[in-house]
Amino acid sequence: MYRLTGVTKRYRRGDETVDALSGVDLVIEGGSQLVIQGPAGGGKTTLLQMLGGLDRPTEGSVELDGTDLARLPEPRLTRIRSESIGFVFRTVNLIPALTALENVETALVPLGLAAAQRRQQAAEALESVGLAEHRDGLPGELSGGQRQRVAVARALVKRPKVLLADEPTGDLDEDARDEVMSLLEGLWRAHGLTFVVVTHDSAIARRAPRLATVRKGRVAVRERGPAR
Ligand SMILES: Nc1ncnc2c1ncn2[C@@H]1O[C@H](COP(=O)(O)OP(=O)(O)OP(=O)(O)O)[C@@H](O)[C@H]1O
């Protein structure tokens, strides 16, 4: 479960300062889904960076299961990121020279697993996204949707408790968008993940149990129904 209290993120641009987030209070229950929408520059990506421990707030606390990510020493924060938080971005950043299986395995390297175990878990993760047959394919040989599914497998292979996705379907065509979003929603349910997704896709927003709008650094949440 996340508990954000008084989170402000201030950037300096020359002589000016910009509050990308401004005094945000937000609770996200463990195992729930939160869809984030809002205008360009409103603070969505900054919010996701706070949740993922990719950056620290200027003020306030970002507790994940009682641990304040804002105040953790860097090595512990890195460890939490590599063990507990999976990321999927809009731009699929697979390593072109590695096969799908090898790309997924890279997420397990920081965890110090034996090579055989890494391979086994990566193969299972690729199977769970429907790409078992493409495990030896290079990213350049896959479609855009398939590449994003490899990225999803890479985010989930470490069995994280949190999945953060920043416009994961933004670069895909319509068919691939539906396929990747259904996959993410299925995995969220199957694994009891806490799933936070930034998306402009109105179909996703319509069926979201909980919808947050981020505008001018402030977050407004609308409840729609059961969040699990
Ligand atoms: N590293 C940075 N340095 C300075 N200003 C920044 C930085 N990152 C973000 N900002 C500013 O903070 C505000 C929020 O940006 P953010 O990227 O979080 O918005 P967003 O809602 O994700 O926008 P988009 O939909 O365009 O991705 C914007 O005014 C942006 O210009």
Image (spheres, helix red, strand yellow):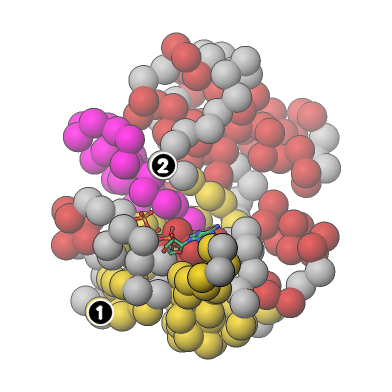
Q: For residue 226, which quarter of the picture?
A: bottom left
> Mark 1 or mark 2: which comes first in sequence?
2
Residue 75 against residue 210 in the figure, above or below: above
Q: Which span is picked out in magenta?
A: 164-186
Q: Is residue 182 magenta?
A: yes
Asked whether the residues under the numbered discs 1 and 2 touch, taking CB atoms below 8 Å apart as contact, a structural biologist would say no
**Discs 1/2, front:** 2
- The quadrant of the picture occupied by the C terminus is bottom left
* On screen, residue 21 above or below 152: below
Q: According to the image, label 1 marks what residue? A: 222
Front position in the image: 150 or 217: 217
Q: Residue at x 79, y 29 (%)?
A: 115
- Vertical placement of 60 versus 193: above or below? below
Q: Position of residue 63 (x, y in %)?
A: 61, 79
Query: Disc 2 residue type?
Result: Arg
**What is the distance, in whole Å, between disc 1 and disc 2 at their CAs?**
25 Å
Can you tell which quarter of the image residue 218 is in? Answer: bottom left
Inspect the image, locate mark 1, and give the three-letter code of the amino acid beneath it.
Arg
Which residue is under mark 2? 90
